[in-house]
């Protein structure tokens, strides 16, 4: 068991992309980071951890497998977590696929990964987060119903809107909870998911995301914020 007094971040879905960058950012700020990958294969997170002087601990979690959630919860039962953040997410292979053409299997995979599994992780691990802590999920500006003027990415977009709704119910069921709860929009970022034509580099997004989470810490209730800390319309 880790007994250091450093603040602890638990970042779920950190093999690559934005989750990996969040781990690097928190470790560079002196946090202890518990970060998850799925499967046994080595990932860029493993390369990062080699040079992180034990600040990064790697655990395995496929978030759509409830048995793995339960097993990891048991492994971490003696830990406290200052920031619990679910980053993992997927888009449809064809981001512009229509409701008529998307397969039931792909729709269910996107919804299970982006909506059901993140909330299962929050519910499973929230008791490790003290009153001063923060519970967050990576949402998307595409999850805003109010801002949906142009469509596109419709299945993915609907999953993030559903995630936001489920997170609102999670927060409503915990009225008076002193912990900060966050839905974060990282901007459109050049990752495997965002693609090479996206607006922002990872370095332009993630340090700002971490600043936004830091600034929100200690403020009770749920907020839907972009990477610069601006409120996003529901
Ligand atoms: N990039 C953007 O422009 C953008 C904009 C708004 C929101 N977001 C959101 O930001 C988050 C990260 O996106 P990204 O751009 O970094 O995407 P990415 O490069 O495709 O990385 C996705 C991450 O999620 C993990 N993951 C996916 N399904 C998982 C599962 N079932 N169990 C555990 N881990 C799983 C992946 O692990 P593997 O390596 O094992 O696949 C990977 O670490 C997502 O929630 C995404 O929706 C991204």
Image (cartoon, rainbow, N blue to C red):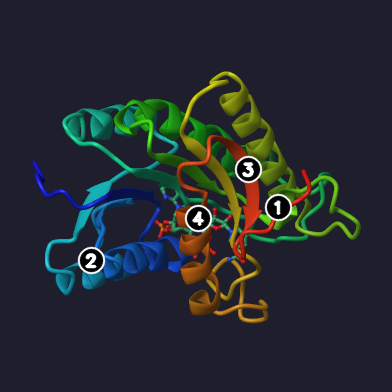
Rendered residue at 51%/32% (across/down): 119
* 192 to 108, vertically: above or below: below
Mark 1 lies on residue: 231
N-terminal of the two: label 3 or label 1? Answer: 3
Q: Are marks 4 and 3 in contact (CB under 8 Å)?
A: no
How many numbered callouts?
4
Cβ at disc 3 under 8 Å from ligand 1? no
The 10 Å Cα crowd at callout 4, few under 14, some 14 to 19, many 20 or more, is few
Q: Which residue is mark 2?
A: 46
Image coordinates of residue 197 in percent, x first then y, are 67, 81
Question: Residue 109: which numbered mark, if any?
Answer: none
Q: For marks 2 and 4, give the CA distance.
A: 29 Å
Quadrant for the N terminus, please: top left
Q: Earlier in the sequence, mark 1 or mark 2?
A: 2
Q: Nearer the viewer, mark 4 or mark 1?
A: 4
Q: Residue at x 48, y 78 (%)?
A: 203
Residue that carries the numbered disc 4 in the rendered image: 215
**For the residues marked 4 and 3, what is the alpha-carbon distance in whole angstroms?**
12 Å
Q: Real-space Cα distance between discs 3 and 1?
A: 7 Å
Do the numbered discs 3 and 1 sit on residues whose CB atoms are within 8 Å?
A: yes
Q: For mark 3, what is the residue?
A: 223
- Which one is earlier in the sequence, the residue at label 4 or at label 3? 4
Image point (58%, 27%), residue name: 171
Q: Nearer the viewer, residue 115 or 93?
A: 115
Task: Give the mark nearest the N terminus, 3 or 2.
Answer: 2
**Figure quadrant of the C terminus:** top right
């Amino acid at each position: 068991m880790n007994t250091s007094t450093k603040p602890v971040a638990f970042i779920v879905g950190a093999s690559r992309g934005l989750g990996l960058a969040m781990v690097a950012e928190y470790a560079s700020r002196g946090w202890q980071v518990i970060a998850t990958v799925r499967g046994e294969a080595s990932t860029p997170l493993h390369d990062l951890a080699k040079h992180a002087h034990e600040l990064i601990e790697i655990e395995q979690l496929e978030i759509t497998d409830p048995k793995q959630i339960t097993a990891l919860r048991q492994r971490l039962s003696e830990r406290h977590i200052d920031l619990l953040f679910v980053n993992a997410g997927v888009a449809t292979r064809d981001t512009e696929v229509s409701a008529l053409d998307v397969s039931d299997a792909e729709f269910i995979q996107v919804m299970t990964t982006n909506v059901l599994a993140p909330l299962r992780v929050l519910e499973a691990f929230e008791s490790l987060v003290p009153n001063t802590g923060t519970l967050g999920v990576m949402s998307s500006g595409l999850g805003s119903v109010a801002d949906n003027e142009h469509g596109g990415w419709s299945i993915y977009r609907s999953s993030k809107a559903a995630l936001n709704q489920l997170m609102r119910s999670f927060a409503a069921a915990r009225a008076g909870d002193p912990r900060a709860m966050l839905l974060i929009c990282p901007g459109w970022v050049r990752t495997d998911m965002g693609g090479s034509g996206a607006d922002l580099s990872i370095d332009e997004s993630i340090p700002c995301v971490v600043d936004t989470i830091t600034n929100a810490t200690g403020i009770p209730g749920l907020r839907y914020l972009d990477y610069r800390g601006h409120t996003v319309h529901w």
